[in-house]
Image: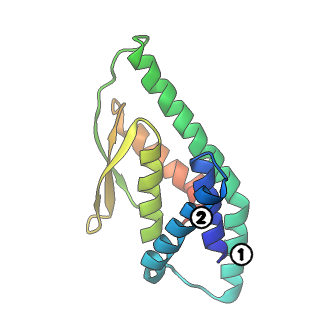
Amino acid sequence: MLRILILALLYGALVNSFSLPDLLMGGGLAVVLTALLWRFNERGPYRSRWRATTRALLFTPVLVGVVMGQIVRGAWQVFQVVIGRKPIPPQGLVEVPFGARSVSGVLATGWIATLSPGLVLVDIDWERRIYTVHAFDASNPATVVAEQLRFYEHTQRHVIP
């Protein structure tokens, strides 16, 4: 139940509206996602679940803030190209390894990456344990990979492992 509430509030923050219809929509989506991904959730002893839930509650505002920052940064980069202040950077596909992500963590990473202008999830290869993104600025693919791994390790892992 707490997970559904957190996801509904996260949805409200992402659509920038905490009205009842939006929260109900976020809650409905959270119920559907939780039901679909229930079998993929790793369940530990009661104590570790309590710690994980507490950590998720504490880090959810951090996750929302970082995602909002990524959206603003990506929009600014695209805006500078659109108005002609910067040249169009080389674009391309970048493969990012899963690392220690769970299935729900990989899906959340792909969804979060697609929210920000500049990155779009293209493919998830479960056998090779990589996901592919199309990067607006793929001049240095290692930087894109490092940013994705850093985002997971410092922010997302605490909320959606």
Q: How is the image coloured?
A: rainbow
Residue sitting farthest toward the top? 85
Residue sitting farthest toward the front? 21
Residue at 37% in and 30% down: 137
Picture coordinates of residue 122 (x, y %)? 29, 50
Q: Quadrant of residue 156?
A: bottom right
Q: Quadrant of residue 130?
A: bottom left
Q: CA distance from mark 1 to mark 2?
A: 27 Å
Split into 4 quadrants, where in the image is the C terminus?
bottom right
Q: Amino acid at mark 1?
A: Arg
Q: Amino acid at mark 2?
A: Leu
Split into 4 quadrants, where in the image is the N terminus?
bottom right
Mark 2 neighbour class, 10 Å CA radius: few under 14, some 14 to 19, many 20 or more: some
Indicate left or right for 131 with 47 as reference. left
Q: Which residue is mark 2?
A: 24
Residue at 53% in and 69% down: 28
Does 10 sit above or below residue 78?
A: below
Mark 1 neighbour class, 10 Å CA radius: few under 14, some 14 to 19, many 20 or more: few
Q: Is residue 99 visible?
A: no
Q: Nearer the viewer, residue 17 or 92?
A: 17
Indicate left or right for 137 with 116 as reference. left
Picture coordinates of residue 89 (x, y %)? 33, 23
Residue at 40% in and 61% down: 98
User: Which of the two labelled residues, at mark 1 and mark 2, occupies the earlier sequence position?
Assistant: 2
Q: Which residue is mark 1?
A: 51
Label 1 SS = helix
Q: Is residue 38 visible?
A: yes
Does 49 sit above or below residue 24?
A: below
Q: Nearer the viewer, residue 153 or 84?
A: 84
Residue at 71% in and 75% down: 51
